[in-house]
Amino acid sequence: MMIAKLESIAHTQNALSYCEQGGEIIYSNQCLGNSKDIYLQMLENNAFNDRCSKQTFHIKIRIAPEDKGKLNTQNWIDIANSYANKIGFQDNPFAVYIHEEGSDSKREHIHIVASKIKSDNLAVSDSYTHYQNMDFCREIEEKYNLRRVDRVLEKIKNNEAFQSSDKRIQPLKEKIFKAIDSSDTMEDLIFLLKIEKIKVKISRGIGFTDEKGVYFKGSSIDRKLSLKGIEKLLSYEHQQNQQLEQNTEQSTEKFNSDLIFDTVNNLIENNSDSNDFEEDTKKRKRPKKRKGI
């Protein structure tokens, strides 16, 4: 199963630097050079739109572990261009970086850093991109004969959450889980938390130091935030289950919305028919005028 994640960001330079350090650039559109050069070109492109606070897309596209090695570099370039057309930033500056995972050399995922600002100075919308991501991934799976799964809800056993009375923990916890949702690897997580001024320490376990310099063990923040717990949350299997769950929930919401619309529409039509019938009946039953005596 292919997984695509899109996020609108403001930290363009950091994202480009991270992508360059962790891999190699394989394609660029309307921009050239290293990460600094590309950042300056995107900055120039975005200069005439000061209303959009997050002017950049950061996209990550990954495939199932068993599909590693099925796609070559040109395949990934074609996939990146197809995705740009799907979302609507195909004419904007964007750069594609390929990253490797694990000890082998088989490439597994790409990063795309793209300007959201078009030539007319309007921003590409990021609304409903989850649905577009779903459709795009299913199309690519079929095209390249990648692993596919049915769109069904898979049950996930929830671990007991740890509750703490320390008021500093909740905002830290929210930032960590948000970063995990946007990460594929531990390196991604460390990078995103660094932007939030949160330091990560990994030894036998994992710990976090907030922006005020206070250190917390991961498991003391939440039981899911132990080292093994985070590795599980970052795993392909967990992300797959999470996406399938979201797909089912959103499909149900759409069904309920359509059902409500149809019901209201039918009520309006029935009411209209009833009013027409009553009006017709009144016309037929007009009283006769009495003759004068």
Image: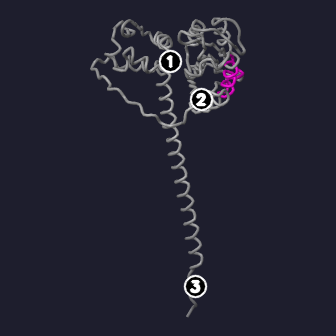
In space, the residues marked 2 and 1 are separated at their CA atoms by: 16 Å
The amino acid type found where label 1 is placed reads Ser
Residue at x 53%, y 11% (from the top left corner) = 102
- Specify whether 56 is left or right of 238: right
| Magenta residues, start to end | 76-93
Circle nearer the N terminus (3, 1): 1
Picture residue at 35% right of the left edge, 14% below the top: 218
Q: Indicate which disc residue 133 carries.
A: 2
For the stretch drawn in magenta, the main secondary structure is: helix
Q: Nearer the viewer, mark 3 or mark 2?
A: 2
Q: In terms of secondary structure, where does tag 2 sit? A: helix
Where residue 124 appears, x then y in whole percent? 64, 26
Mark 2 burial class by Cα count in 10 Å: few <14, some 14-19, many 20+:
many
Q: Contact, CB < 8 Å: mark 3 with mark 2? A: no
Q: Residue 262 or 60: which is nearer the viewer?
A: 60
Give the position of the C terminus as an image quadrant. Answer: bottom right
Mark found first going from the N terminus, 3 or 2: 2
SS of the residue at dot 1? loop
Q: State left or right for residue 110 relative to residue 232.
A: right
As drawn, the label of residue 288 is 3
Q: Residue at x 54, y 9 (%)?
A: 103
Local SS, label 3: loop
Q: CA distance from mark 3 to mark 2?
A: 70 Å
